[in-house]
Amino acid sequence: MPTDPDHRPTTDARTSEEEPRVRFEDVHKKFGRTTVLEDLNFVVGRGERVTLIGPSGSGKTTILRLLMTLETLTGGYIWVDGDPLTHDRRDGKRVELRPKQVAEVRKRIGMVFQQFNLFPNMTVLQNIVEAPVHVLGQSRDQAAENALSLLDKVGLRDRADAHPTELSGGQQQRVAIARALAMDPEILLLDEVTSALDPELVGDVLNVLKDVAASTDITMLIVTHEMQFARDVSNRVMMFDSGRVLEEAPPEQLFSNPQHERTQKFLEAVV
Ligand code: ADP
């Protein structure tokens, strides 16, 4: 037996500090006959904030949706803390996991969508409380208490009993952020979360997210065209082109000194 008190069994990947939060290994994704991602490999470390940029159709949203298990892989593996997300490798073969196993890993991931996706027939509070009660098994009281403190955090405690249609787009998006955080995710996926908002509502949403980034160690994968936001919150920017990582670097480096002409052109067009 090792005598090192910090020794952790290497067979238990979840407890290994070496394991990145997310690992894409030879990930392949086809829609019908169209290949969107081909042999994609990358890792995201614990607590890292990575912004995915690139032209429309380059596969960024597909990457987030694969992590959220909203799409199925057509090849390769995605590992979360060393645990397989949807497919495992056994005896050299790729095997599909059982839905229960998938749900166990999937619980660690939260997502905020461009279109908020709140339940319209529920109040703000009910929207946030639902998943912690049904998925995490929290009591309603406990979930409601937590939801109210999250609403405080996003500046909407006084709208707990409102319905989504009574709120502005920016307020709905802040509720969606609170809803994702209520699941206490290890990983937060943000897919163009300000694209559907009127320009004057964008700042509040980004400020809430900056606050989340500053006050938690949640790992984030962010798809956005808000380059200042990417600069403010991310440690790394990955530029995608046709499902491949064209280049990656810390934001200050990638934005000021892009190595590829395609990245330069893309940045000129969005900034
Ligand atoms: P991005 O987020 O970079 O704009 P996407 O991941 O949304 O790119 O899309 C990548 C490619 O996959 C696009 O060509 C898109 O048309 C295609 N695609 C995405 N979702 C589907 C789908 N459900 N069915 C067919 N094609 C899809």
Image (cartoon, helix red, strand yellow):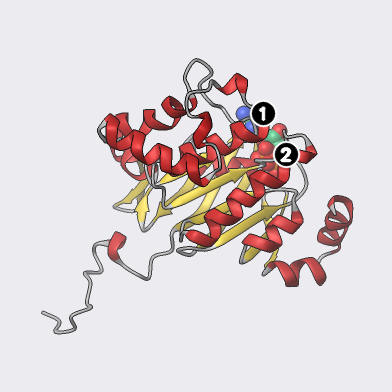
On the image, the x and y values in percent for residue 90 come to: 30, 50
Crowding at dot 1, Cα within 10 Å, few <14 / some 14-19 / many 20+, comes out as: few
Query: Which residue is depicted at the point 35% across and 33% down?
Result: 144
Q: Is residue 104 visible?
A: yes
Query: Badge 2: how crowded within 10 Å, few (<14), some, or many (20+)?
Result: some
Percent coordinates x, y for residue 146 in the rendering: 37, 41
Q: Report the residue that reaches farthest toward the bottom.
A: 3
Which residue lies at the image location 63% right of the left edge and 60% below the top edge?
233
Query: Which residue is found at the position 83% from the left and 57% from the top?
Result: 267
Q: Circle 1 is placed at which residue position?
A: 168
Reply above or below: 64 against 245: above
User: Up-down: is 207 above or below 144?
Assistant: below
Closer to us: 261 or 105: 105
138 on left or right of 124: left
Kind of residue sitting beneath label 2: Leu
Q: How many marks?
A: 2
Mark 2 lies on residue: 201
Q: Using the image as rendered, state which of residue 133 and residue 259 is in the foreground.
A: 133
As rendered, which of 108 and 140 lies closer to the eye?
Answer: 140
> Residue 174 appears at what percent x and percent y?
58, 38
Secondary element type, mark 1: loop
Q: Among all residues in the image, which is located at the extreme left?
A: 1
Q: Looking at the image, is mark 1 or mark 2 earlier in the sequence?
A: 1
